[in-house]
Amino acid sequence: MDYNQNPYQIDFRVYIGILFFRWQIIALCFLYSLLAGVLYLNFAPKRYRTSCKLMIYRDINLQSTVDQSPWKQFNAHIYLLQSEKLRRRVVNKLFNTWGEKIGGKEKMMLAVDAVPDRKIGSTLHISVEFWNSEYAEAFLSALIEEHEAEWGSIQRTAVDSATVMLEQELLKMEDNIRQAEDRLIEYKRLNDIARIEARGSMESRYLIALMERKNQIMTELMLLEAQTPALKDASASVISDVNKLTRETGAVKPIPETEVEPQEEGKEKETSAGIKSRTEIPEDRAAALPKSLTAEAIDESTGSDESGWRDLRVKLAQLQLKEKELLKNLETEHPQVKSVRKEIENTQNMLKVAAEIEMGRLRDRHKALSIQLAAVEAAEYKWQAKNLLASQRQAELKRIAGVVDRFENNYNSLYQKLHDMRVSEELKADHFRVVESVATEKNPVWPDPLKILMFALAVGLGSGLGLAFLAQTMDNKMQTISDVEKVLGIPFLGGVPFWVHSGLESTVRPIVTEEHSAGAVEAYRALRTSILAALAKANDNLLIVTSADSREGKTLTALNVAIMIAQMGKSVLLVDMDLRRGRLHRSVGVNREPGMTDVLRN
């Protein structure tokens, strides 16, 4: 049978054996720790908790615009209540009364615990722990008074500091506004802004008129370029009508834009610095083209020419009608017919010449329009340059005026903040009220019996288990089967349970013969089989049963093994080698003498 175990495998039987065989150490440590806890509960100085509830709020009807949110942050108050400076001030205040009773200032310094109350909003739960409840109540009352005074001082100091800072900023802002206004006035004086505004308005009107005329010229040029190929064989009247229609179409004016924001009567757009807006121009002040440049004036000069071409067309029609009447009565070679045909030919030639003249006038018109377009564009560029200069100066003026506006807005904002802080400080919106007066609990908070006993239990069990495992580690005795095989180098043949029977200490009985010992019989039978196998393997028939100490079961084992072997029908010689206290003869019912010493002596 292989009893070797894996060295990395945890054998829980070892730990169970430690608890079973070394329970005295664990029990002793547990009892001593429990005793120490009970003694601490009885003799340790008791501490009592003194507490109160402080409500901190603001009057809703008197809150300023500086703080619109509910005031529920207690971090500053908790820090102030727990600060060493405030507690030391309380100790100095109470030292004359409580110094000798408590034993000095260091012992009078109590730790303060302040937490927000969960049930009542805007409330702090303040508590201290001390063995003298009267001093704790006096300390807590004085602490609340000092806290209220200190908080008011902090608020006043903060308001005064902020007021001084804001007043300094207001003075600086006034200087900045004054300097910005001086720069604005100086810029207006140096650049003659009033004249630039008037001239800029006039330049804008002229520029708009030139742009309108430029668009008309470009429209007429595009129409002429598109219609010229179609007038190749047209008559003078057609060409004249096309010329007239082209001028009328080129004189078309754009549709005026609708007003986005109508202005009230008697008012005009103006910035805070006095700059008038030029986004709208009244119609009666709009620049108009000279009458000589309009299409109507040009059409008047062509009216007389059109009447001449119309007379020639009437004359040609009359001559053609006269020719038809003459051909009814006369031959084609008749002098009157020839004379009429000659006049018709002359009239047609004149109409062709008129058509050429009209085409020439169209070409001249195209060339003149091109020249006029170039001239108008040149004039437009010059007016644009002048208008750009005026616009740049006005933009710079607007920028300087914007600086003045920003300074004024910042000044108004700072002044409003200063006013709000002064109103808030005058109203004294912070209030302190003790909603639950200072009181001390009847039962001490320390020592806590439950905590002390649980701690003693944990220390006792921990120290007992630790000492038990330490003793097990330091023990060098053979305790397991593997230790026996490893140290002695002999095989393990079998094990017999530790049977405890009444009278076993005085009488060794054959257990295998008892009816109620079936387990023992099986154990000894297994041991007998292993012994016989080992003896046969060693070719020997001698067995010695021994141990290192008394009362370990040598006689009991030898007796029962001998009985089990004898039951197999083998002869067994059982010799009791215990020369000092031999008891084997009583178990088998024989006389004590003669014994082994008698045999050896003989």
Image (tube, helix red, strand yellow):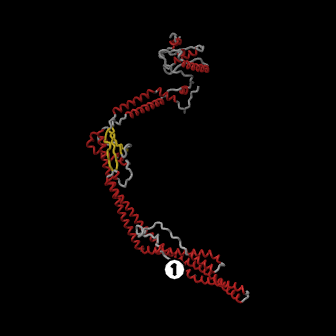
Q: Determine whether, in the image, residue 445 is placed left or right of residue 209.
A: left
Q: Determine whether, in the image, residue 598 is placed left or right of residue 322.
A: left
User: Compared to 223, does 331 lie above or below?
Assistant: below
Q: Determine whether, in the image, residue 598 is placed left or right of residue 66.
A: right
User: Compared to 144, does 329 lie above or below?
Assistant: below
Instruction: Say if residue 213 shows up in the picture.
Output: yes
Q: Residue beneath label 1, please?
A: 291
Q: Determine whether, in the image, residue 484 is placed left or right of residue 100.
A: right
Pick the front one: 420 or 169: 420
Residue 507 in the image: state x and y as whole percent: 49, 14
Residue 151 in the image: state x and y as whole percent: 32, 50
Pick the front one: 574 or 240: 240
User: Compared to 324, does 94 lie above or below?
Assistant: above
Amino acid type, callout 1: Lys
User: Compared to 581, does 40 lie above or below?
Assistant: below
**Image quadrant where residue 413 sits:** bottom left
Residue 302 in the image: state x and y as whole percent: 58, 82
Residue 519 in the image: state x and y as whole percent: 54, 19
